[in-house]
Image (cartoon, rainbow, N blue to C red):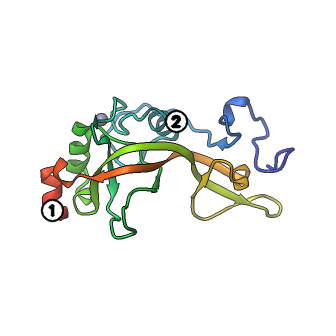
Amino acid sequence: MVGPRGGIAYPDETPYDRDADGILWLRTLINTGGGRPDFGRVHPLRQRWVMRRLLCQVCGGPADKDERGTLWLLEDHRADWDGWPNGLLTAHPPVCVPCAREAVRFCPNLLAGHVAVRVGASQVCGVYGVRYLPGRPHLVPSPTATVVEYGDPAGRWVLASQLVRALSDCTVVLDEFADVSARSQ
Ligand SMILES: [Zn+2]
């Protein structure tokens, strides 16, 4: 529904439904079921928790960090711009080394399309979610989810499901996973 101050709202909204920036978050059931790690699909509550604290997206332990920065596995878009992934906005949390290896083993696509990156600095800068547009009789969700940065007025119309970080001081480290880089070079 449309809230009293414009933007989307839950009819029975509580303070827990919004973050400190006033953005509405998707309500989800907490599923603690096991199963094998599903790389790239992280539960919203868990994603928020691990992204905020720079924990591993798979096991929830500390993400790996060395003198070059925190370890991320990213889809390889090095051709997108000079210095990629500096300036990239991502909803994917970092990883620890054992989980990165495990993820690559479970998800062979990673071998072809991902690179390991050391990120020297990153900042929580916005959310990823579905933007709603005016419609009758109900609001209409946009067909694809989008990134909205904090401070953007569009944030009032977004139902957030993931936290987004801006990456900087990045180093692509193909040597990090010899088994990965051998196939991605
Ligand atoms: Zn891990």
Which dot marks residue 48? none
Front-most of 157 and 172?
Answer: 172
Looking at the image, residue 143 lies above or below residue 157: below
Report, in whole angstroms, how far the alpha carbon at label 2 lies from the one at label 1: 34 Å
Figure check: 103 above or below 87: above
Q: Residue at x 17, y 54 (%)?
A: 180
The C terminus appears in which quarter of the rendering? bottom left
Of the four image quadrants, the one with ligand 1 is top left
**Circle 2: residue type:** Leu
Residue annotated with mark 2: 45
Looking at the image, residue 4 sits to the left or right of residue 68; the answer is right
24 up-or-down from 148: above or below: above
In x, y percent, where is residue 37? 32, 41
| Mark positioned earlier in the residue sequence (2 or 1) | 2
Residue 126 x %, y %: 58, 47
> Ligand 1 closer than 8 Å to the CB at disc 1?
no
**Quarter residue 120 falls in:** top left
Viewer-proximal residue among 145 and 83: 83
Q: Badge 2, how many Cα within 10 Å: few under 14, some, many 20+?
A: some
In the structure shown, which secondary structural element does the residue marked by tag 2 occupy? helix
Residue found at x 35% / y 34%: 34
Mark linked to residue 183: 1
